[in-house]
Each structure stands twice: as C-alpha cells, then as structure tokens.
Image (cartoon, grey):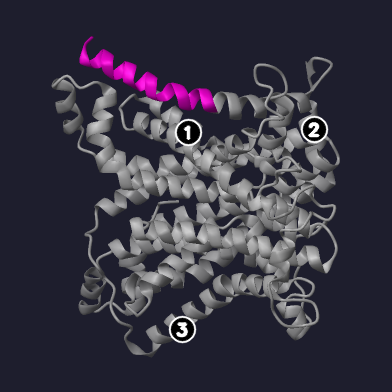
C-alpha cells in the first residue's frame, strides 16, 4: 500500500469512531425530538415555526435571552479587562495563585454558581441578613452570576494576548512624543482588538445558552431560551414549541461559532507577529496601585465571596453557630426528595464522570489526531461537527435520549451508561481544543520518518505523538472530568431518581421548601465545588493553563 493510501486509511480510521459516536448519540436524538415536534400525521408542519415565534410570550423569552447576554458580556468586559491587564502586566506577590483562583469559577457547575449566589443574594442570604436586600428573581443576580463564570474567559484570552504585546513599542511611541492614552490607542489596542472580540464572543455564547444559574436565580418570570426549552419539554410537554426554540438557539449559536472561529484565526495571526516577552513589572505610581486594588476588590467580591458564603451556609446550623449537621444529614434518607441518601450522589457523580472522561478522551483524542492531517474540506467540516454539541440545547439532547434511545438495539433508557454518554458529549469539544494545538505542533517529519522505516500508523502514534502530548492528554482528561461532574442540562432528564448526580441532587433539594433541604443543597454544592476546584488546581501543577485553553 502506498504512503498516500495508508494516510487516507489512517484518516478514515481516526474519524470513524468520533463520527459514529456523534451520529448515534447526538445527531440521532436531536433529529428525533425536532422531527417529532415539527411533524404531525407523518407530514411536516413548517408553519409551526411562524406560529411559535409569533407568540408574544416566546418573543419576550428570545428578547430577554439576547439582551441579558449582551448586558452580561458588557459587564464582564468592564470588570474583567482591568484584571486581564493587572495579571498580565503587574508583578506582585500571589500573582500566580490569583491566576489560578480566577479560573476556578469557569469550571464550576452552573448549579454551584446558582447556589452560591442564592446564598449571597437570595432570601435568608448574606445581603438579606445584613441589609435586607434580595436580588433573587431579578436580572441583576443573573448578570452577577454570569460575571462570576466568565471573568476567567476575559482574563485568560485578553491577558494572554497582553503578555505577548511588547511594552517597548508603546514606550517608544511615548518617547517620540505620544501621550499615554494616544500610545495605548494606536499601539496596544489594535493588537488586543482580536482577542477582546474573541473573548466577547465566547462570553456572549456562554450567557446566551445559560441554564442552571438562570433556572435557580431567575425565578418563574425570567427565562432564557434554554430554560424555556426545559419548561416546554419537562413541565408542559409541548414538543412543537420546544423543537422550534431548539432550532432558533442552534442557528444563533452556529452563527456565533462561525464568527468566533474567524476571530480566533485573526488573533492567532496577530500572535505570530509579536515577540514573546515577559512584560510584568511591579506597580508604579498611585494610578497602578489603585487599579490593582480595584481588581483585587472585584475578585474578592464577585469571585471569592459567593463561594465563601456558600461554605458558610453549608456549615450554619439552626439557632446560630456552625457545625456539620447539614453534611451529616446527607447520609440520611432523602426525605421524599430521593429514594436514597443524598450523599450517594457524590459517588454516582465520580463514577459517571470517570467513565465519561474515558469516553471523551478516546473520542476527542482520535478526532484531534484526525484534524492534524491535511484533508481539505472534509477535515474542516469534521472540525465544525465536533463543536455542534456546544451549540445545541443540552435539554434537547437529554430529552432526545429518552425519545430516540427507546428501542433495540439502542434501548438505553434504563442503562446507567446513558448519563456518562451525555456528559462525554460536552467533554469531547474540550478534549479536542486542548489536544489539537499540541498535536499540530509536533514536527510532521518525525511521523514521516517513522512511516518510512515501516512503522504502522498506530505505532507512529504510540512512539512519536504520545510521548510529546502526554501532558496535554492529562490536561484534557482533567477538563473533561470537571465538565462531566457539572453537566446538568441533559443529565436532569436521564439521571434515575435512585442514582442522581450532584448537580441534579442540588437542583432537586433547592426545589423543596425547608431549612434542612436548603442546608443539604448548600453542603452538596460545597462538595461539588471542592472536587472541581481540586481538579483544576492539580492541572495547574501539571502545566500552566494558557489562554485559549477553553
């Protein structure tokens, strides 16, 4: 067999498993639920799209989804850009630790963030106790929670670019007579513009598809498209409306992903034009010290205070004081919420996430290896296919599992494997994005030399690629594990009552009245937060996270 034929065979072999996985467990369930919603008596009803979108209530949901995402993006940029500058350009004690701390919220499950802000701004929360102020059920709670999540996106994306911009260029402009603002406007801002745009698009995408935080903090009046899809499917069983909303969300997110891909290519081109320097210097002057103080205040108030309040609420006991009463209650029966003790959700989540990580690493690793090989439009189309799960409603995927996977040979509704498969769908894009840059950096001449010497494609991967990408593989597995632990949108439909995951258990406990169930929800959220944060900090020790790792 010629080298070209062997290369084509290797590409087909690498692509086969990821394509089969996405076809069976993503495309098929989503198509099934959308077609069931838009078909009646065997005939398509495209007119339902106009019927649904003409509903004033649905129009308000679409409008709220768009404007809250835009407001969240602007607020996040306003608060996080100074942090990106400070962590990129200022050298101060604890800088490395602070970079890790601001990244922790990004990998926390949305349910944990919702619980943390509920403990801070909800009824009986810290602000309610101290000042009689409640923000739950208002858009402000949602906006603040979105800043909590996405602060790290701006810091990592824009801050990583800021570190690549040589400060001597701006200093030279000032020596030639330009003012501080003029030098920044004409030298630094053009270099940062692609990364700012990329960060803004990512934040808008994440907040546009927000689910867990909005479900917990928004109340019945405030709903994004994702929350409305959940309400239409789980509560009203209105599949036509849910199908139309899923199509609208998918189309909007597809456009955002396309724009984001073009923006990222511009950013990568800009990075190649700048020198790699370490621009960090100790703060100089009152202005820089004040800005650093403002950054630390924002990080403390928006990123550290909510988790701290969450821990405090999990330890508070009736009548005042602190103790482990709520944690001990997790080992008791579910009190009507679950048929098992809530603490069993911890073991369930760990097992599910471990299996999901293995699936995501295998599927995503093969996909990343295939994407490193030149195959024109086929590979570009495959790359877009891998990102589709991030642009589709997780609620639609979960409900689609129940509808589509209900007959042999795919009757999996009663199988425990359904949960890790759904979690792996979200983990695969993260694995691909972490491993792909490293695999592309491997000198292809090493692979060619091994092939000329007679090594099979599998041996080339084992002997050449794997030793060079081992750390990236571990990093990808860690991200997949953390993402799997926190997956909620699809899991809420398919997790069995006797085997709930941590996010599902937290949501169900928060949905029941009573001080004990509230305390148990805070305790489970704390456990989930600690597990995810521990995974991230361990990854920081393996290899510093770079901008664009998201």
Mark found first going from the N terminus, 3 or 2 = 2
Q: Secondary structure at mark 3?
A: helix
Mark found first going from the N terminus, 3 or 1 = 3
Mark found first going from the N terminus, 1 or 2 = 2
Neighbor class of circle 2 (other Cα within 10 Å; few <14, some 14-19, many 20+) is: many
What secondary structure prevails in the magenta region?
helix
Neighbor class of circle 1 (other Cα within 10 Å; few <14, some 14-19, many 20+) is: few
* Mark 3–mark 2 distance (CA, rounded to whole Å): 51 Å
The residue that label 2 is drawn on is 239
Q: Position of residue 488 (x, y in %)?
A: 66, 47
Corner quadrant of residue 58: top right
* Vertical order, 186 against 227 (above or below): below
The residue that label 3 is drawn on is 293
* Vertical order, 452 against 420 (above or below): above
Label of residue 384 in the image: 1
Q: Secondary structure at mark 1?
A: helix
Residue plotted at (54% across, 35% down): 388
Is residue 166 visible to us here?
A: yes
């Amino acid at each position: 067999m010629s080298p070209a034929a062997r290369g084509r065979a290797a590409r087909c072999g690498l692509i086969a498993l990821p394509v089969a996985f996405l076809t069976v467990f993503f495309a098929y369930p989503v198509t099934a639920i959308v077609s069931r919603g838009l078909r009646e008596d065997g005939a398509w009803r495209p007119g339902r799209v106009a019927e649904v979108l003409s509903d004033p209530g649905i129009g308000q949901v679409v409008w709220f989804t768009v404007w809250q995402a835009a407001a969240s993006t602007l607020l996040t940029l306003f608060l996080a850009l100074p942090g990106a500058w400070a962590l990129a350009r200022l050298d101060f004690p604890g800088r490395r630790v602070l970079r890790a701390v601001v990244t922790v919220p990004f990998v926390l499950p949305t349910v944990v963030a919702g619980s943390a802000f509920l403990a801070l701004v909800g009824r009986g929360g810290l602000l309610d106790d101290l000042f009689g102020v409640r923000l739950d059920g208002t858009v402000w709670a949602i906006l603040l929670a979105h800043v909590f999540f996405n602060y790290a996106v701006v810091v990592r994306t824009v801050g990583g670019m800021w570190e690549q911009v040589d400060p001597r260029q701006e200093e030279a402009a000032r020596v030639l007579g330009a003012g501080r603002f003029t030098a920044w406007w004409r030298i630094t801002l053009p270099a940062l513009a692609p990364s700012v745009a990329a960060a803004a698009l990512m934040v808008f995408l994440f907040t546009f598809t927000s689910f867990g935080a909005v479900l917990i903090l928004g109340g019945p009046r405030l709903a994004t498209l994702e929350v409305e899809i959940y309400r239409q499917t789980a509560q009203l069983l209105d599949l036509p409306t849910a199908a139309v909303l899923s199509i609208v969300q998918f189309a909007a997110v597809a456009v955002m992903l396309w724009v984001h891909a073009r923006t990222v290519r511009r950013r990568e081109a800009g990075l190649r034009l700048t020198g790699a320097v370490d621009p960090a210097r100790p703060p100089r002057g009152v202005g820089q010290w004040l800005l650093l103080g403002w950054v630390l205040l924002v990080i403390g108030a928006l990123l550290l205070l909510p988790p701290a309040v969450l821990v405090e609420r999990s330890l508070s006991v009736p009548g005042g004081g602190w103790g482990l009463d709520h944690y001990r209650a997790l080992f008791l029966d579910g009190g009507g919420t679950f048929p098992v003790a809530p603490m069993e959700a911890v073991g369930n989540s760990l097992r599910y996430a471990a299996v999901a990580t293995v699936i995501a690493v295998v599927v995503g690793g093969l996909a990343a290896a295939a994407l490193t090989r030149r195959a024109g439009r086929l590979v570009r189309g495959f790359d877009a296919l891998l990102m589709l799960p991030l642009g589709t409603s997780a609620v639609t995927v979960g409900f689609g599992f129940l509808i589509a996977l209900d007959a042999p040979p795919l009757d999996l509704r009663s199988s425990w494997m359904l949960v890790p498969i759904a979690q792996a769908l979200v983990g695969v894009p993260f694995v691909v994005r972490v491993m792909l840059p490293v695999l592309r950096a491997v000198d292809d001449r090493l692979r060619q030399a091994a092939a000329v010497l007679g090594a099979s494609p599998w041996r080339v991967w084992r002997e050449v690629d794997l030793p060079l990408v081992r750390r990236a593989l571990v990093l990808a597995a860690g991200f997949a594990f953390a993402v799997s632990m926190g997956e909620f949108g699809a899991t809420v439909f398919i997790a069995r009552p006797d085997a709930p995951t941590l996010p599902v258990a937290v949501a169900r406990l928060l949905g029941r009245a009573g001080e004990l169930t509230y305390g148990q929800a805070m305790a489970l959220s704390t456990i989930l937060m600690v597990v995810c944060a521990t995974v991230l900090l361990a990854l920081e020790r393996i290899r510093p996270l770079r901008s664009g790792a998201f």
